[in-house]
Image (cartoon, rainbow, N blue to C red):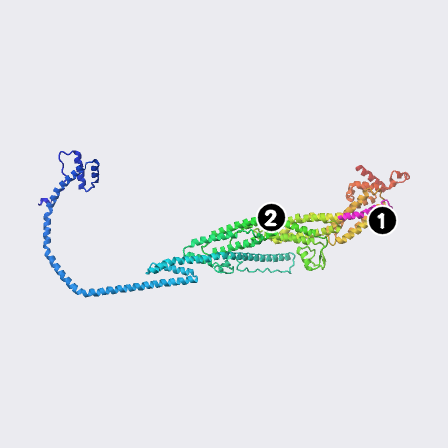
Amino acid sequence: MQSSKVRRKVGPTTAGAGIDTAEKLDELLISSAICNGEDLGPFVRKTFGTGKPETLLHHLKFFARSKESEIEEVCKAHYQDFIHAVDDLKSLLSDVESLKSALSDSNSKLQSVAAPLLSSLDSLVEAQTVSKNVDLAIGAVTHCVRVMELVSRANQHLQSGNFYMALKCVDSIESDFMEKTPSSTLKRMLEKRIPEIRSYVERKVMKEFQDWMVEIRVVSRNLGQLAIGEASAARQREEELRIKQRQAEEQSRLSLRDCVYALNEEEDDEFGSGPESSDAGSSGGGLLGFDLTPLYRAYHIHQTLSLEDGFKQYYLENRKLQLRNDSQVSSMTPFLESHQTFFAQIAGFFIVEDRVLRTGGSLISKLEVEFLWDVAVTNMCAVLEDQFSRMQTANHLLLIKDYVSLLGVSLRRYGYTVDSLLEVLSKHRDKYHELLLSDCRKQITEALSADKFEQMLMKKEYEYSMNVLSFQLQTSDIVPAFPYIAPFSTTVPDCCRIVRSFIEDSVSFMSHGGQLDFYDVVKKYLDRLLGEVLDEALLKLINTSVHGVSQAMQVAANMAVFERACDFFFRHAAQLSGVPMRMAERGRRHFPLTKAQNAAEDTLSGLLKKKIDGFMTLIENVNWTSEDIPQGGNEYMNEVLIYLETLVSTAQQILPAKVLKRVLRDVLAHISEKIVGTLCGDLVKRLSMAAIKGVDVDIQLLDSFTEQLTPLLTDKEAKEMKTAFVEIRQMVNLLLSSHPENFVNPVIRERSYNALDYRKVATVSEKFRDPSDSIFGTFGTRGSRQNPKNKSLDALIKRLKDVS
């Protein structure tokens, strides 16, 4: 028995000698796998794969038989221990029975004592359960009461239109009470009504917002008109200040120290001070008269509903549509009549957007506003390009340009860039001035055609101020007595008004257009107006309508006044352009009406020459061979001088001295030429000494006439006037000299006879030769001595013939 206690591992027995080596190997592998607890699946699959399951079954049975003996040996080794354990358990059976009896007695005693306590405990548990149920009921009722209070409050807010507070109540119910509501009925009701309330609030605020979107278009138009009106008023105040400043500068330039101007700066109103002043009315009407409350209310409600992004996109798309509609020009109404409404609508639109950008939180971004502005600017530029290309009236173009510039001033206060609009205006600068020149050409033509070539009569001082002082045409600061007859005709102030209007319109177009220094441009077109339009119109008037001396004299007087007026025009253009007077004076050009001025003086001289030629026909009545000297001068000269004296007395009232001097000098030169021409012509066959002395008297009368002009001319000018008839004077001096042959002496000729032509001298000398000195006149006086003067004259004639 003791030896059986030793456990040993029994290996698999070998098969009979008749099994081959492969079967033994398989038997060993299977035995080893079973002993080691390995998976027998591979062996089974192999066996069935070869189609010999009997071999595997034989191996398994063999292995089982080999283990039976081993099991038997193990059982024999341990059965004695099992018997001892059973004996031990039997010895404990009596003790267990005694313990069981004691436990039963104790249980009986416990049951008898605890029965009343259990009854009391059951009552206590039942009471606690009832109390808990009551507490739960009270809590549920309290919860439902609070829910109903919030519901009632939400209803009150909805009825009063306080949608935000109603939504806050609904959100509180949903987040704080919905899951805890014990009443399923109430819970179902809340789950159904809360989305309906939110949908109702969204519909209401969207209805208010849509109404506001319709209303804001009308408000924007009025707002734009107000903004542009304020900009226009501010510009007017600036113009008034500049006018006062120019007046002060003019008074300073004229050294009138007693005139003092105070430039009072007016405070701009709240609107004019820029967008900052309008922030106070961002949610209400304010000074600007528009209300953003419906917009901000709708935005706030959508933020509360977590629909912020959708509302922002909806607002932006609707504003784009409104801007597209506002940027369309009606084909039913002329743009000249609708342009103010068109631009005011757009200005109001972006004033509203600026307010929304600055006070609306993140409702719209700066980039979105800039995008809207770029779209609007592109549309406005296209509209302006199209409308300007169709316009053929300068005033219409100026009206639209002024309004667009005011639009730019208004919106620049809010940070919008308007350079593109100003570039469009500047692009049409040349077209505007061409139209303006065309209009002025028509006006000037009408003004000149209505001229009666009569001096202008002014009966009242205001007429003098309007026609003379306003254009600085006066020659003296002393106001004349009335009625006053001006030296010019009505054409001068009429044309001056046209030119001044041209300057003001040109400056008005060029100013407020982004270009600060535009005087050169204004001056260029002013030169064209004066040089091409006015000068040509005056030239045409002179060539076609001036037929008499009085008319020509009036036109020449007008040209002298125009010369002063042109100085005023350039000063006026410089003042309006903000250019200092010294710079304007430095860049002043020549008189732009030179052609017309020369034509006027030439026409006057030509008409006077024709008139003089009429009197000079009396020269045919002169007896050139007479031996009597006319003491009072020849008849033709007396008639000429009478006419010239009458002419001067009339002309000096309207013609400036320099113009009168030029005309008279030309006339006197013509008289000299006529006399010399007569002496050289076929009309005079022979000249006597008395006839030459008579011409000398005529020349002395001309000298006396020029000396009478001394009050009008300086001594130098009087001497220059006498040079007009220097040719006839030197001719007479030569014929009256005792040595005429000195004419061929270069020194003497240059000093005393530089105006004479030797051919004319030869012709007149031949006629002046004494007939007694001729060939046939020497027979009776052959032995007598020849007159030295005649001898000198013969020598002169001979020398001149040799030269010719």
Q: Secondary structure at mark 2?
A: helix
Q: Which residue corresponds to the image point at 16% horizontal and 33% vertical from the top-left?
A: 20
Q: Nearer the viewer, residue 507 or 435?
A: 435
The answer, for residue 520, to whether it is visible in the render is no
Q: Nearer the viewer, residue 755 or 156?
A: 156
Q: Amino acid at mark 1?
A: Pro
What range is drawn magenta here?
A: 607-628
The answer to whether marks 1 and 2 mark residues whose Cβ atoms lie closer than 8 Å is no
- Look at the image and tell me in which quarter the N terminus lies: top left
- Look at the image and tell me in which quarter the C terminus lies: top right
Residue 212: percent from the left, percent from the top?
48, 57
Residue 232: percent from the left, percent from the top?
57, 56
The mark lying in front, picked from 1 and 2, is 2
Q: Which residue corresponds to the image point at 20% horizontal and 65% vertical from the top-left?
A: 117
* Residue 614 belongs to the span the image colors magenta: yes
Q: Which residue is mark 1?
A: 630
Q: Residues within 10 Å of mark 1 (few under 14, many from 20)?
A: some
Majority secondary structure of magenta residues: helix
* Residue 705 belongs to the span the image colors magenta: no
Task: State the residue lying farthest toward the left.
Answer: 1
Q: Amino acid at mark 2?
A: Lys
Image quadrant of residue 169?
A: bottom left
Mark number displayed over residue 320: none
Residue 238: percent from the left, percent from the top?
58, 57
Q: Which residue is mark 2?
A: 431
Q: Is residue 650 left or right of residue 369?
A: right
Q: Nearer the viewer, residue 377 or 318?
A: 318
Q: Earlier in the sequence, mark 1 or mark 2?
A: 2
Q: Residues within 10 Å of mark 2 (few under 14, many from 20)?
A: some
The answer, for residue 436, to whether it is visible in the render is yes
